[in-house]
Image (spheres, rainbow, N blue to C red):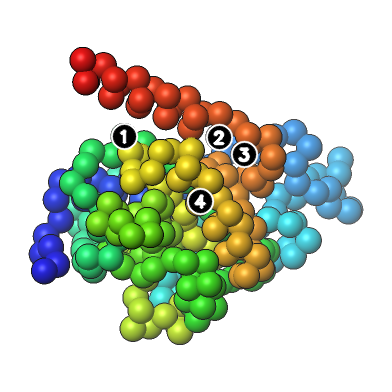
Amino acid sequence: MESQGLSANELRLILIVVGVVVLAVIYYLGSPRKPGQGRRVAGKPGGERREPTLAGADADDGLPSMRATDDDGEAFVDDAPGATASRSRAADSDDLFPTPPRSNVGQRPEQPVERIVTLFIAARAGQTIRGSDLVVAAEKCGLEFGDLGIFHRLVDGKRELGPIFSAANMVKPGHFDMSRIDELSTPGLSFFMALPGPLPALDAWDTMLPTAQRLAELLDAVVLDEERNALGRQRISHIRDDLRAWDRKQDGSRIRADW
């Protein structure tokens, strides 16, 4: 029997996921450019720099488009970050956070979420990811569509433990409508694992990363870190060290609790 309502912990997880999507876009729009970024435009006084556009108009920028749109083509991000901060959040809440579909597949046990580890899969500049391609690629990568209307990787033989990690749409509201999946066109996906989970954090990461890399390969996309930078070896090593330390801390907490 499927759960009919959202628990406080599940609602918190949903808001975290949607928050990750929103913050990722706002980060790109609002973060200051480092010196040397952008391109010089010929004919401009002093060699004025021109920043890459978000809509993918400059194909040689090498940056994925982050101008996310909903099914009606409406831009997800306001043209001016912060310009609508005074709008009534209550009035927009139903549009921003509609109740996602529930399923026993990938449903997380009632357990506090202490940490979220995130990766992004982004379409290349000027391209998008089609829903039909996503479904085929997700199946090849061992992902299952389920709870909250998103994809999950489950533990073989222990599905009741919940997802090792999940993959949501980068476009609001984050879940996928399978009845209209052939109409979907998205700039990317948000991979995330909620800790603690069914596996130690480092093992979960070592499952999520190659899956994200394989999915990106199948979709001709790129893998980015939580700050939307290219995911290089140094960053991967840092994340693994961080999660190894987190596992040690968790083990220490369990030992103290046993005492």
Pointer 2 or 1: first along the chain: 1
Q: Vertically, is 140 above or below 9?
A: below
Q: Is residue 214 left or right of residue 24?
A: right
The picture quadrant where one finds residue 98 is bottom left
Pinpoint residue 198: horizontal percent, then vertical percent: 33, 46
Label 3 sits on residue: 236
Mark 3 and mark 2 in contact (Cβ < 8 Å)?
Answer: yes
What kind of element bears circle 3? helix
Q: Amino acid at mark 3?
A: Ile
Pointer 1 or 3: first along the chain: 1
Pinpoint residue 34: horizontal percent, then vertical percent: 70, 34
What kind of element bears circle 4? helix
Q: Amino acid at mark 4?
A: Thr
Residue positioned 75% across, 50% down in the render: 50
| Residue sitting nearer the eye, 123 or 65 | 123
What kind of element bears circle 1? loop
Instruction: Give neighbour class at mark 4: few <14, some 14-19, many 20+ (Cα, 10 Å).
Output: some
Q: Which mark is residue 207?
A: 4
Pinpoint residue 93: horizontal percent, then vertical percent: 23, 56
